[in-house]
Image (spheres, rainbow, N blue to C red):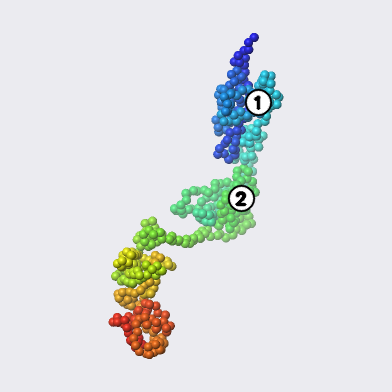
Amino acid sequence: MSKLPPFIEHDRRVLLFNAYHEEDVLQSAVEDKRILTCEIYFYVEDGTMEIIQAKQENSGIPQGVFLRRSKVAKRGSSRCYEIDDLKIGNQVLIYSRAFHIVNCNESTRNYVLENHGWSLDEVAPLPLPRDDYAESNRAKMKRESGVPGVDRKRKMNDLKLVMESMLGKERSITDRGMFLECGTDALCFHVVWDDRERLYGDIQYFRLFYYLADDTVEIMRAQAKSNDGRDSFAKLLKRSNLPKNGWVLGSDLSSADCYTWRDLAIGESINIFGRNMLIAKCDAFTRLYYRSNGIELKDDMPLHIAEKKVEVKRVIPPYNGFGTEEDSLRSCTGGLNPPPPMKDLQKMRDKSGMILRFNAQLVSDKPDDVTRRFVVQYFMEDDTMAIREPPVRNSGVMGGNFLRRQTMKRSNGECYAATDMYVGNIVDIVGHRFLLLNADEYSYRLMECDDRTFLYSNLPRLHESLASKQNEIKSYFITKYNGNGILDMDELADCCKHVGLKFNQQEVITIWRKLDKKGKGKVAFKKLIGL
């Protein structure tokens, strides 16, 4: 007798294997992998397979048919999976997922033992790996469902008690006596919440009502200032028991965990859900109630606390080079649309056209800079400076404006003043040091006329210094010139230095201009003594 074809011999024969595979879980704080169980159906008649994944409630991933009935080729081979590849303990790779076979049903076990010669070890069931998330989820569903006898580790909801009472469940009322005795009587305290230690904190005022009937507390906001920047609200805390630690709520509260009227006193601080409030004042009824119970409250404290004045030290940023420095300072100290800097109009009128001009040279070690000459101008009307270099033929240096008219500063940050302009002084301009050699006639006269400002051109002061050293000056010239002869400005400077008069070059020029009014360059020694 010929052998029957497989589709007739094994018609409707299906083998069932239990397996699992691991699925990565992304963006979860409680799990990183999830164990997913499935059933592998192997159809013997044509060698096809079907995989159905077991559905789980609230898994968050699609489940059900994972692989429709079809032949599955092995990875890296043209052969398809057969029955012998599905032994318990084997791992089969199907479309990049590794399925671990752990068990099979009874009919499948009998078939492979009789027809394929599997050993008992190859059909022995294996345990599934532990899935912590699945176990915790099952425990949670038991707690959330109505299964009796399960410790749900949750507090009793007060609303549930009300609903049970409406449905007929009796409940003992223990506080009826206080309600009949006290009625709606309430103790009133004025409390202050000082939160200035925190960022953007402030002082806020509230009224605390303590209801004697049921030991509940209600906190109302006091009359707020207009435009205080806060949303208006009537209550900070609705009428309820006030826990001392601020975390235990609802039916789990005991009388020892809540504030009572004995815990409230003037000068004491109470914790209202993390807010430390100071009891500062009470009304007459509250004071009388405490006195009737043998407790004398302290005198009322000042309700309004003086706000701490924060001295803000203005920090002026450094000048960034845009515009003038006065404009930058005005933008730092003014509003969004600062006005232009204020100018000293009186000074501009009084000193209009007054310009100090000096010949100067660069103080430098470079040979090319030694012969360069400059004209330094100081404008007294607005304390600005300008420097110009006269062009010299074949000097190799292009003359012209060296510094445009502007306000300049010394190394200490202060602006150059008119008193800094005198012969012999060195001014530092943008890293260049200029030695003032001499001035024009107009500048000398201008400084001598305003000798209170320009002390080095104050002739009466120089007269007093010369008069104090008159005998030494005579002795110097008698020794050197036999008391007769003429002298020039350099010899005058040497004489002053020899007798101990520490005159600078500007002071020597001032004395010399008084002696040599005609500008001859020489004066008689007797004229100096007569000065």
Residue 526 location, x and y as percent? 34, 88
Disc 1 packing (10 Å; few <14; some 14–19; many ≥20): many
Residue 181 location, x and y as percent? 61, 48
Q: Is residue 135 above or below residue 496?
A: above
Q: Is residue 271 above or below residue 507?
A: above
Disc number lying in front (2 or 1): 1
Which residue is pictured at 39% across the width and 78% down the height? 504
Residue corresponding to mark 1 = 87
- Quarter holding the C terminus is bottom left
Q: Is residue 397 above or below residue 182?
A: below
Q: Is residue 503 above or below residue 149?
A: below
Check contact, mark 2 vs mark 1: CB within 8 A. Answer: no
Question: Of residues 260 and 522, which is closer to you in this image?
Answer: 522
Say what secondary structure mark 1 lies in: loop
Residue 19 location, x and y as percent? 63, 28
Say what secondary structure mark 2 lies in: loop
Residue corresponding to mark 2 = 244
Which residue is pictured at 40% across the width and 89% down the height? 479
